[in-house]
Image (cartoon, grey):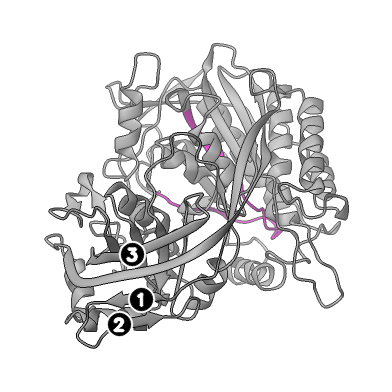
């Protein structure tokens, strides 16, 4: 097989390293093999998408009869495609889930200010939940410490917690990361492109690692990319989590949000100005500020345990079967939901994500037809994405295939039926050497890459691949193109807006026999080539220098001699 050695480079944009004829025989060379196109069945895509999004499956909610039907159907389709069970002879991985519903919320009481106690009302002023499986949650006179953006990033020489002991205290944290307001992609945290350090999930995790009892994020609409109404609705009902097991990671007692104007009042009670603290937090020499105030609250929790399943199929490799290339998509959707005006209350999730799940089947069948690749190809349909990437996170925390033997992968989440495009949208460009596999795979297409137009929203951190990425496994996340052959970018934006406003997470995300599949099939051809290249390559692509996930990948690769080796 002809192979091309391509010098690996660190790039902020996908235009870097476009000279695919460059050869480097040194330690940083990437092996990018030529691969033939696969035969991907449009009929399979239509058939599986239509079936999964039919009313028979009742919206595919985990833990429901519709969810169980989905799992059984996927096993049937994977077996029909010629794939093998991926979990030691089983098609499934059990995913234990916990649903915690807070109730009887006391106000968030702030004490110690000159004006006396402040009481913040739940939902309108603040929201909070616990990740702990405790019937009763109480935060009692926990000292408040303003920790800026709550970032501890050694590779960027940035630590907002340096010199402060957070044991038993509550961190008050800004949303996004320190340079979010930059117009360019230049800066210590990639300018306006959000890094993982800007996501609320990271901020709660880091506060817990620092020993905090509480973590409260100051909501701000622009850097959050959504209003307080989204926070209030998302954080005031049942919250589902993957079960943490017997050795859970550190967890705070309370994680929450506070309305920005209430945060301004709290800081004023401490003799501090919010705007001045926000400006100070953008500087590398920022030091955490004890506020001389305490926070108290309490609430009760209803706890429900249930289980769902990830479905795992594979095509064993012919030369290096213990090295794995992942393909991920979530099979779940919302089940029954708020009815449409016509009374329809089933959120069928045809685009989101029956299309991506069907792609696992169609790609798997195409690879089977082509014969085994050198590495093992894995097709992972995960559960409970809509509840917070829970199935993917559970797999990545309890991997069937060791993460230091997992080369990388591709995530597929919702194919819009927009028709053929001149481009492909890359969510999170410039993060890893997988960009070079993408560039090579595009050589035979008359298409270009378009970086995600809203990097500040942090979409790279909001789909199933992220569970792998934060544990070091390089993952690509691609969307359909925006520059449509018929109508250009204006038409592409109109299709996306129509779906978002009229169908997304609603009962009208239904299968349409008149859909134009040309763009989807073009994307799947690209995904096939990337997957096959990774599976036939000898290289282990890594994250680019300075990326927040490179350190954990390097650590995993160094654990023993049987795992990956940095490219």
Q: Is residue 366 above or below residue 174?
A: above
Distance Cα–Cα, label 1 vs label 3:
9 Å
As displayed, is residue 453 above or below residue 408? below
Report the Cα–Cα distance between label 1 and label 2: 7 Å
Task: Check residue 506 in the rendering and tell me which mark sits there, or answer none.
Answer: none
Q: Which residue carries the number 1 mark? A: 109
**Camera sees residue 192:** no
Asked if the residue under mark 2 is in contact with the one under mark 1, i.e. CB atoms within 8 Å, the reply is yes
**Horizontal arrangement in the rendering, residue 467 relative to residue 543 (left or right):** right
**Which region of the structure is painted magenta?**
407-429
Horizontal relation, residue 359 to residue 100: left or right: right
Magenta stretch prevailing secondary structure: loop
Q: Nearer the viewer, residue 119 or 310?
A: 119
Q: Residue 216 appears at what percent x and percent y?
A: 36, 66
**Residue 421 on the magenta segment:** yes
Closer to the camera, 311 or 19? 311
Which badge, 1 or 3, comes first in the chain's sequence? 1
Residue at mark 3: 140
Residue 67, image quadrant: top right
Q: Can residue 212 be seen here?
A: yes
Residue found at x 65% / y 42%: 524
The residue that appears at 73% across and 46% down in the rendered structure is 63
In what quadrant of the picture does the C terminus appear?
Answer: top left
Label 2: which residue?
117
For the residues labelled 3 and 2, the Cα–Cα distance comes to 14 Å
């Amino acid at each position: 097989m002809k192979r091309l050695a391509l010098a690996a480079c660190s790039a902020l944009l996908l235009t870097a390293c476009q000279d695919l004829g460059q050869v480097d025989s040194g330690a940083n060379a990437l092996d990018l093999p030529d691969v033939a196109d696969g035969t991907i069945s449009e009929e399979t895509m239509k058939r599986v998408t239509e079936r999964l999004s039919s009313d028979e499956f009742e919206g595919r909610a985990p833990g429901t009869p519709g969810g169980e039907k989905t799992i059984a159907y996927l096993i049937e389709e994977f077996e029909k495609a010629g794939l093998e069970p991926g979990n030691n002879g089983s098609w499934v991985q059990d995913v234990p889930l916990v649903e915690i519903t807070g109730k009887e919320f006391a106000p968030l009481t702030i004490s110690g200010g000159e004006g006396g106690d402040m009481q913040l009302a739940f939902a309108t002023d603040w929201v909070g939940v616990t990740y702990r499986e405790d019937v009763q949650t109480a935060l009692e006179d926990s000292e408040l410490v303003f920790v800026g953006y709550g970032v501890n990033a050694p590779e960027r020489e940035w630590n907002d917690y340096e010199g402060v002991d957070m044991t038993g205290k509550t961190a008050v944290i800004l949303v996004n990361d320190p340079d979010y307001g930059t117009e360019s992609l230049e800066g210590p945290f990639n300018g306006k492109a959000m890094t993982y350090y800007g996501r609320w999930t990271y901020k709660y995790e880091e506060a817990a690692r620092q020993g905090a009892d509480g973590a409260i994020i100051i909501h701000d609409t622009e850097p959050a990319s959504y209003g307080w109404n989204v926070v209030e609705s998302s954080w005031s009902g049942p919250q589902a989590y993957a079960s943490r097991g017997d050795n859970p990671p550190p967890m705070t007692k309370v994680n929450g949000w506070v309305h920005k104007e209430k945060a301004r009042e709290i800081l004023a009670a401490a003799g501090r100005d919010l705007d001045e603290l926000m400006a100070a937090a953008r500087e590398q020499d920022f030091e955490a500020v004890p506020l001389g105030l305490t926070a108290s609250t309490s609430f009760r929790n209803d706890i429900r345990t249930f289980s769902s399943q990830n479905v795992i199929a594979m095509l064993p490799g012919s030369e290096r079967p213990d090295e794995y290339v992942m393909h991920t998509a979530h099979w779940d959707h919302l089940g029954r939901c708020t009815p449409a005006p016509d009374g329809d209350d089933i959120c069928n999730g045809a685009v989101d994500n029956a299309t991506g799940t069907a792609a696992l089947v169609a790609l798997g069948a195409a690879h089977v037809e082509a014969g085994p690749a050198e590495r093992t190809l894995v097709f992972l349909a995960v559960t409970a994405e809509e509840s917070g990437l829970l199935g993917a996170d559970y797999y990545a925390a309890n991997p069937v295939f060791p993460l230091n033997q997992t080369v990388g992968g591709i995530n597929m989440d919702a194919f819009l039926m927009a028709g053929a495009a001149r481009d492909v949208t890359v969510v999170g460009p410039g993060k890893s050497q997988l960009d070079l596999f993408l560039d090579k795979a595009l050589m035979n297409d008359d298409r270009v890459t378009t970086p995600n137009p809203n990097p500040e929203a942090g979409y790279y951190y909001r789909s199933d691949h992220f569970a792998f990425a934060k544990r070091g496994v390089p993952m690509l996340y691609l969307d359909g193109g925006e520059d449509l052959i018929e109508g250009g970018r204006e038409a592409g934006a109109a299709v996306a807006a129509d779906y978002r406003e009229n169908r997304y997470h609603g009962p009208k995300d239904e299968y349409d026999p008149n859909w134009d599949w040309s763009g989807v099939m073009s994307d799947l051809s690209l995904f096939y080539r990337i997957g096959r290249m990774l599976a036939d390559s000898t290289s282990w692509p890594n994250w680019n220098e300075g990326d927040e996930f490179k350190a954990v990948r390097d650590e995993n690769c160094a654990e023993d001699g049987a795992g990956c080796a940095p490219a």
